[in-house]
Image: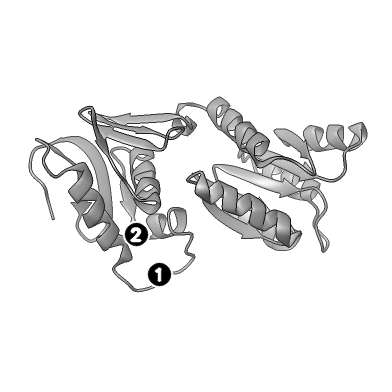
Amino acid sequence: MRCLVIEDEADTSRYVCKGLREAGYAVTPCGNGLDGLHYATSEQWDIIILDRLLPGQVDGLSIIAKLRDLGKKTPVIIVSALTNIDERVAGLRVGADDYISKPFAFSELLARIEALLRRAGPGHDATRLQVADLVLDLRAMRVMRDARPIALQPREFRLLEYLMRHEGQVVTRTMLLESVWDYRFDPQTNVIDVQISRLRNKIDKGFAAALIHTVRGVGYRLAPGEAVLDG
């Protein structure tokens, strides 16, 4: 899950980003309205957390208005110190999906994010994913295959979640770097290959059919029905 956090208060940004990463989200922080507008409109996000007041010429409402003008339906939650009813109504009318007042508990923000993602449709179901006999439970942070528990590190869990959300599709190195590692550049390392290899050893080794497959020269694909591990 890719989350964009547009927040100029450094402490609030760190607080939100840390909590989201611990919950398994791939988070990109942004500290001003102009950069926030660029990121929000030029890339694909599962959800955007947005401060109402931002430094510079672009505020939170302008970002939402531009998103909606472009036809983008990305769920947006406003977090703001502006708590009166008129400000809340203005935020919702311009196209925000939810509005939460500062200060707030992270547990409430996370619950609102999960509720929005559930309403966004099956592809954004934030609780349970399944491909063949492989099951990933996001609430419990648990993975099982053929009813056998599989222990994953946080990065492996995020990588598997991304592959499962794109079942049957080829995902490229660039897609993985941006969505799982939060990189906007290729570090020219074999970090992806190493993590895929580790994930394969846990997900596929010892089972009758492989689920994770290499598409040579392109990327990787997670799909059921392959009886032999490929390179």
**What's the residue type where badge 1 is placed?**
Asp
Q: Amino acid at mark 2?
A: Arg
Percent from the top left, x then y, of residue 1?
A: 48, 44
Q: Secondary structure at mark 2?
A: helix
What secondary structure is marked by label 1?
loop
On the image, numbered disc 1 is attached to which residue?
186
Mark 1 vs 2, N-terminal side: 2
Q: Are marks 1 and 2 in contact (CB under 8 Å)?
A: yes
Vertical relation: 30 (above or below) 24 = below
Residue 97 figure quarter:
top right
Q: Residues within 10 Å of mark 2 (few under 14, many from 20)?
A: some
Q: Picture coordinates of residue 43 (x, y %)?
A: 55, 53
Q: Residue at x 57, y 32 (%)?
A: 114
Left or right: 75 in relation to 93: left
Residue at 33 percent across and 55 percent down: it is 172
Which of the numbered marks, if any, corresponds to residue 173?
A: 2
- Viewer-nearest residue: 10 or 180: 10
Please state, as top left, top right, bottom left or bottom right, where the C terminus lies in the image.
bottom left
- Which of the pair 150/174 is nearer the observer? 150
Question: Can you tell which quarter of the image residue 31 is in?
Answer: bottom right
- Is residue 37 something one can see in this rendering? no
